[in-house]
Image: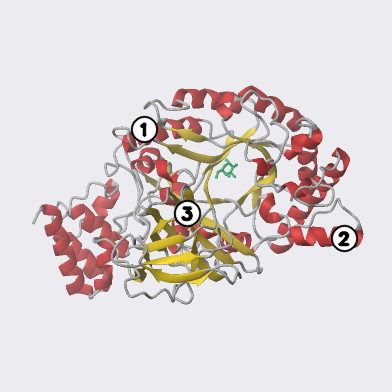
Amino acid sequence: MNMKQKATAAFLSCLIAVSGASSLVNAADSEPETEPILVTGFEDKDVSKFSKRGDDDTSVIEASTEKPHSGDYCMAVTGRSEGWNGPSVSLAALGCEAGVPYVATAWVKAAWYNECKLSMQYTDADGEDHYVNLTKATSQGEWVQIPQAKFTFSEEWKNVQIYIEANDKAELYVDDFQLSTAPVYPIEQDIPGLKDVYGDYFKIGGAVTASELSNKSCQELVLKHYNSLTLGNELKPENMLDAKATREYYKESGDNTTPKVKLNGDAKYILNFCRDHNIPVRGHVLVWYSQTPRWFFTEDYTQDGDLVDKATMTNRMENYIKGVFEVLAEQYPDVDFYAWDVVNEALEDGGQPRAKGSYEEGNGSSAWVAIYGDNSFIEPAFKFARQYAPEGCKLYYNDYNEYMKVDAMLKLALDLKEKGYLDGLGLQSHLNVTNNATSEAFPTVGMYANALDQFCKSGLDIQITELDATYDHTVKDGEKLQADYYDGIMAAIAKHKDQISACVFWGTTDDQSWRGDRTPLLFDGKFKAKPAYYSITDGIEYTVTTGTTRQEIGQTTSKTTATETTASTGASTPGSSAGKGYDIAGDVNQDGNVTVSDAILLARIVAEDTSASVTDKGREMAELDGETGLTVDDLTALLKQLVGIK
Ligand code: GLA
């Protein structure tokens, strides 16, 4: 047994002896368990858990001996009349529960060059159906494994199904299908919250989608670290526009300038969470070339119709913006929409407008430009946003590659600021620690910092709106490079804390990120803080505001009495802090309370876990056995204190 194993064993035996709390074993030490839900290679010829999608009479699902991937049988779906007519399993029928993370994978074989997707279907609280692709693999007529997908579903969703689809309707074979619960990883409660560390600087936030947030660990991560949320997709035009109601209203009234707006069940799921936990929201986004359907721009609201003229579109834009703010004010009067991205990504890198076209063309072309001929739709968008946004809500022009279009963005924004329509600029900040070809960063920290200096000199309010920094996993010491890069980027941002009012990450954990294969965030898929997290939190003195009432996930907010204390995350290496903190015996993690989290942290210290982060004050408060040095005896004393044994 090495030192770590000995200390852990000692921890476990005294934990069990003192408190009988054997359920903590997983949290402290071993890999969380998973439970198989449906794992089959079809060797028993049972395909009854799978049903057909679509209402054709021709497709058949059956066990087959057609060259299985393993064993003697696989499952065949033949006679399909659409690519999406694949085998589907109902999660409710399998006893799956909302909020629980699951993983699924399967081997598939389809006709030559078929993209085979593992997708999810559900009906939201408003009865609207959603179809989400989770993972995919291309079969070239041979067996291929669809990579494991991780997903969670919310309690408000009905008829949740996982299904397999392909591009064409040729026969589809499936083998070695696996659906299990995903391991549940608790978040690390014993590290400082980002929102506390940067509390004196700016808001710290993240983007989330409804599915991501339905995972309880994700909720805990958000509550611990973020004091701003951005809805990843749910407030974008494609989700806010109610096609059916818009077309019906047009048919009844002949008025083709008043698109109807609604919040779908997913938007409400996130907004309820923000309301219940008092989390301010960054609205994203009103006017954008992408994720805005072409029918919004056509004369009769049909997908392929002729585009309307400028005057009609301006009326339509006004009513859309008005509708968005109205629906939010009506349904979420208590949510603080402190910022909105009014226009997103209207400038090419050279500062010119996008090409004329539409979102559906998939080439970055814009229906706004197709109608207005240029970027002259931006000013009315801001004018209307100012007119209808609630008081105090700041309005931003948001864009990517901002370090390459500083002049164009400043020119646009300063003019609109002068007219009283705009408050600031949103810098997306999708960055690269390395790119594929070399280990060079793009942008370099220096390039980003220079651009930031210029943006901040303008006097405009600046928000970092979608921060993530990817690296190529073939590069040596990638995680370390990423940590150093984040350190430089955050130092550049923090330097301008008087001009920067929010810093928002695009996501929570790497596995849920849109750039997940290049792990761009501060937390990994196990909710563990990465070196990048430590690089931006170490060495910052901060003030913690703690409530006297503990708020549990799922409960509504209760008013809390705030107490303030100054803490420090220490010098450049985690665990070497020399800060002030709480003078509470046993408060190892310095969160103002003595709980089992302190015992877990102390166990990690005793086990010489070098990633355990503790301040000097925390170490001092862990000295409980009267002897200098942290040992199993201190841990036993802490456990006794926790369960009230003298
Ligand atoms: C852009 C958009 C965001 C989001 C990301 C990718 O940056 O502004 O809304 O779609 O791309 O997820």
Q: How many marks?
A: 3
Residue 535: x and y in percent read 36, 38
What is the three-letter code of the residue carrying label 2? Lys
Label 3: how many Cα within 10 Å (few below 14, some 14–19, many 20+): many
Q: Position of residue 363 (x, y in %)?
A: 63, 36
Q: Is residue 600 above or below residue 293?
A: below
What residue occupies the far right of the structure in this picture? 254
* Picture residue at 42% right of the left edge, 27% below the top: 441
Kindly identify which residue carries mark 3: 116
Q: Which residue is mark 2?
A: 251
Does residue 29 appear left or right of residue 38 in this picture? left
Query: Residue 279 location, x and y as percent?
Result: 57, 56
Closer to the camera in the image, 57 or 29: 57
Q: Quadrant of the N terminus?
A: bottom left
User: Residue 406 sits in which quadrant?
Assistant: top right
The answer to which image quadrant residue 5 occupies is bottom left
Which residue is depicted at the point 89% across and 63% down? Answer: 252
Is any part of residue 32 visible from this angle? yes
Name the residue tied to disc 1.
Answer: 484
Mark 1 burial class by Cα count in 10 Å: few <14, some 14-19, many 20+: some
Q: Marks 1 and 2, how far apart in space?
A: 58 Å
